Amino acid sequence: MELKKQIQALGEEAKKLISEAIDIEKLNQIRVEFLGKKGKLKNILKTLGKLSPEERKEIGQLANKIKEELEQLLKGRQEELKKKALEEELSKNKIDITLPPHWIEAGASHPVISTLIEISETFISMGFSVAEGPEVEKEEYNFDMLNIPKDHPARDMQDTFFLNNGDVLRTHTSPVQIRTMLKQKPPIAVIAPGRVYRKDADPTHSPMFHQIEGLLVDENVTFRDLKGILKVFLETTFGKDIPIRFRPSYFPFTEPSAEVDIGCTVCGGKGCRVCKGTGWLEILGCGMVDPNVFKAVDIDPDKYTGFAFGLGVERIAMLKYRITDIRLLFTGDLRFNHQFKGIR
């Protein structure tokens, strides 16, 4: 039968071409040429209508058999070509496993930033929110409204950077208290973390450093509330067993005022060079908000009371991680930072 011979010859031709194909693209061309909708096998099968039913059945079975054989051969040859291409690619780009790797060392959080975040989270957990203010501040907010008028001797307590327009680089984050109380009436519970500036530089002082100011204003706020809040903060930061003491002090914007000390974290209170033999380390200043400050922001001091506190973040970081020179915090030396991996 002539049609049967044509189909068999077609199959042999396709098998030969498949075995000789050198790439995937050529294989796809062979697939389309012989098995596509307009391929050679389809064209031959279009003539089946001229045959008897018995011949159509025989030719149809043969065509299906050859089609299945060709599809299997195409699939197998495609796998062979893929494997060969991969082997060639690997041989061209052979990896020398004896070479050292490109090591990417994980970074470390800076101890000041870690300490600032940790302190902020402690007060936020006690109901405080975060307030912010500008670092270039008006004298009015930085001094006058904080009960530090121009002729007040307390201005000499802080060496200030003055700008040509009369503004200052803020010497503390206390101006944020003023800005907050001008915008918001009690009850108020905020902390104000940020950079501050003073003309000072030695192993324990930097011209730029970080402070966190705290302010709570409401009816019937007492010094006892202040002590409780600070006790929770210090025990969270330095551990439950840390000794704490309050000493009377003076700040223009609080009355009464106190300095807060903790037991020396270096010698455990026995006395050492860091604590100057006293066994105690000064950690922060605090007090009840002076009525004059309330009057400056139009809050009734007969109805409301409040407390404020301020602490140096670098100071706490140095005590917490036993850093002896504040200048190490600002060198930008990655070797220094890497010592504090995993502290957060």
Image (tube, rainbow, N blue to C red):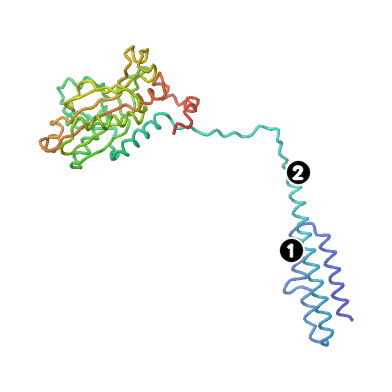
Looking at the image, which residue is at 37% across and 20% down?
Answer: 265
Give residue 250's quadrant in the image.
Answer: top left
Query: Does the residue at mark 2 contact the one at mark 1 (Cβ under 8 Å)?
Result: no
Which residue carries the number 2 mark?
A: 91
Number of marks present in the image shown: 2
Give residue 201's quadrant in the image.
Answer: top left
Q: Quadrant of the N terminus?
A: bottom right
Looking at the image, which residue is at 73% across and 49% down?
Answer: 86
* Residue 245 position in % (x across, y down): 27, 22
Query: What's the residue type where badge 2 is placed?
Result: Ser
Query: What's the residue type where badge 1 is placed?
Result: Asn
Residue positioned most to the left:
302
Q: Kindly state the secondary structure of the residue where label 1 is placed.
A: helix
Which residue carries the number 1 mark?
A: 28
Q: Is residue 114 left or right of residue 66?
A: left
Between 159 and 274, the one nearer to me in the picture: 274
Between 221 and 134, the one nearer to me in the picture: 221
Looking at the image, which residue is at 15% across and 32% down?
Answer: 293
Q: Earlier in the sequence, mark 2 or mark 1?
A: 1
Measure the alpha-carbon separation of dots 2 and 1: 26 Å
